[in-house]
Image (cartoon, rainbow, N blue to C red):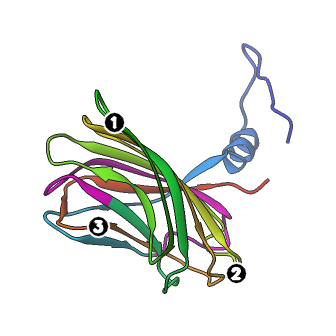
């Protein structure tokens, strides 16, 4: 759809408003609180036929220590995940990391000494095809950039976000869908 340009003094009708709101790109789906001292968070009813691609934003979480974070689709079990990425420790090391035959995608790191945020892009979780993910996480100690793939073709409506060990506390998970063209 072409972008409409409005001019000063032009009347914005209900039809114009509805058309442009209905064709917006990123649409809020749901929000869920992480909780306190949990090993994982299950988010249900996040994916459907309405959207093929999603953005998940996680803000304000901390961990019981420095832990890797994991992302698993709700209907994808077994060792179907592969991940590659980079870990940047501020003022320290740069590490390249790869993993295959995993039970979840590695998304980033969460730390206990500061608040961690993460952004996860998810492609095709509800479709009966393979799915892919990109994950970025940022804390006061680490920056992570990950790419993951799930070879399972099972359709999923939700996901589990978890710590590789220990627990995570606080924060909010917000799910958005990218509107189809």
Give the label, 3 or 1, closer to the camera. Answer: 1
Q: Which residue is mark 2?
A: 128
Nearest the eye: 70 or 74 = 70
Q: Which residue is mark 1?
A: 93
Q: Which residue is mark 3?
A: 164
Please determine whether, in this image, residue 30 is positioned above or below residue 14. Answer: below
Image spot of residue 27 (x, y percent): 58, 52
Disc on the earlier residue, 1 or 2: 1
Q: Is residue 65 left or right of residue 109?
A: left
Q: Residue at (19%, 69%) from the top-left corner?
A: 38
Question: Judging from the image, what secondary structure is the residue with disc 3 in?
Answer: loop
Give the label, 2 or 3, closer to the camera. Answer: 3
Image spot of residue 11 (x, y percent): 73, 26
Nearest the eye: 85 or 172 = 85
Please determine whether, in this image, residue 141 is positioned above or below residue 6. Answer: below
CB within 8 Å, label 1 to label 2: no
């Amino acid at each position: 759809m072409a972008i409409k340009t409005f001019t000063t003094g032009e009347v914005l009708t209900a039809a114009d408003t509805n058309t442009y709101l209905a064709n917006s790109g990123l649409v809020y789906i749901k929000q869920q609180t992480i909780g306190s001292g949990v090993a994982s968070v299950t988010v249900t009813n996040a994916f459907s036929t309405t959207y093929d691609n999603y953005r998940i934003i996680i803000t304000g979480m901390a961990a019981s220590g420095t832990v890797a974070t994991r992302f698993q689709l709700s209907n994808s079990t077994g060792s179907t995940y592969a991940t590659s990425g980079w870990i940047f420790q501020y003022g320290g090391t740069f590490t390249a990391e790869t993993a295959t035959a995993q039970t979840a995608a590695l998304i980033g790191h969460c730390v206990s000494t500061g608040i961690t945020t993460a952004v996860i892009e998810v492609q095709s979780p509800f479709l009966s095809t393979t799915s892919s993910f990109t994950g970025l996480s940022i804390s006061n100690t680490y920056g992570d950039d990950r790419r993951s793939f799930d070879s399972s073709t099972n359709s999923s409506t939700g996901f589990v976000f978890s710590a590789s060990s220990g627990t995570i506390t606080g924060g909010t998970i917000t799910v958005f869908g990218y509107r189809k063209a």
